[in-house]
Image (cartoon, grey):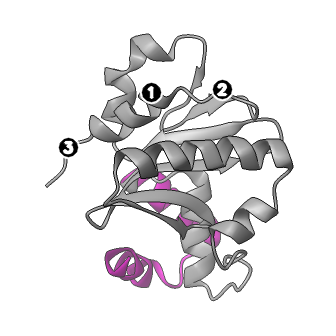
Amino acid sequence: MEYWFGVMAELKGQKYPEQMACLQENHDFSRAHANALVLYSRGSLSAHRFDDIDGYLASLDQVKQETIREIMRVLAAKHRRGEWVLAWNKPLFALDGAYVFGVSASSQHLLIAPFDTEVLQQLKSRLVGYKVNKKTVQVPVDWPVDRQLIIDMVDLQPRQ
């Protein structure tokens, strides 16, 4: 994060839309992540909505909670040295200190995402039937979790 705080320091004084455009166009940020960083760098306290993953999950209905908890269990069981953390107000899975997978809920669906977007290309044939965005895959809120897909989204990412 120190790097990104440095980037934001260089953008200080620019208007919100200019800062957003820089992060999205030059650094390939999603709109949500760019917004979180811009607001945080501007001192917004609303950018920090949850104290922990349980707080995040408590904000969701039971169906979404159960689906996300199952996704979390799959990766925690497969990668015992990994850890689920809350970053950008979303549950992210980290291995060896690096984020490798994230999940979030919206009103009508969940988004799952490997941090290396090349993984989506590698799994393209297995993602038929899902809505695949630039960096995320949209799944139903009551998704019967495809355990192997989730594991592969993590395992196919290059690691140092």
Residue 40 shown in magenta: no
**Residue designated by label 2:** 144
Residue underneath mark 1 = 149
Q: Residue 150: image x %, image y %?
A: 46, 34
Vertical arrangement, residue 116 with respect to residue 59, above or below: above
Task: Please tell me how crowded label 1 is: few (under 14), some (14-19), or many (20+) other residues with Cα within 10 Å.
Answer: few
Q: Are marks 2 and 3 in contact (CB under 8 Å)?
A: no
Q: Of the residues under marks 2 and 3, which one precedes in the sequence? A: 2
Callout 1 secondary element:
helix
Q: Is residue 15 visible?
A: no
**Mark 2: amino acid:** Pro
- Residues under labels 2 and 3: Cα distance? 27 Å
Query: Where, by quadrant of the figure, is residue 138 drawn?
Result: top right
**Kind of residue at disc 1:** Leu
Label 2 Cα neighbours within 10 Å, binned few <14 / some 14-19 / many ≥20: few
Q: CA distance from mark 1 to mark 2?
A: 12 Å
Q: Residue at x 33, y 43 (%)?
A: 116
The numbered disc on residue 158 is 3
Camera-near label (2 vs 3) is 2
Front residue (pair 12, 118): 118
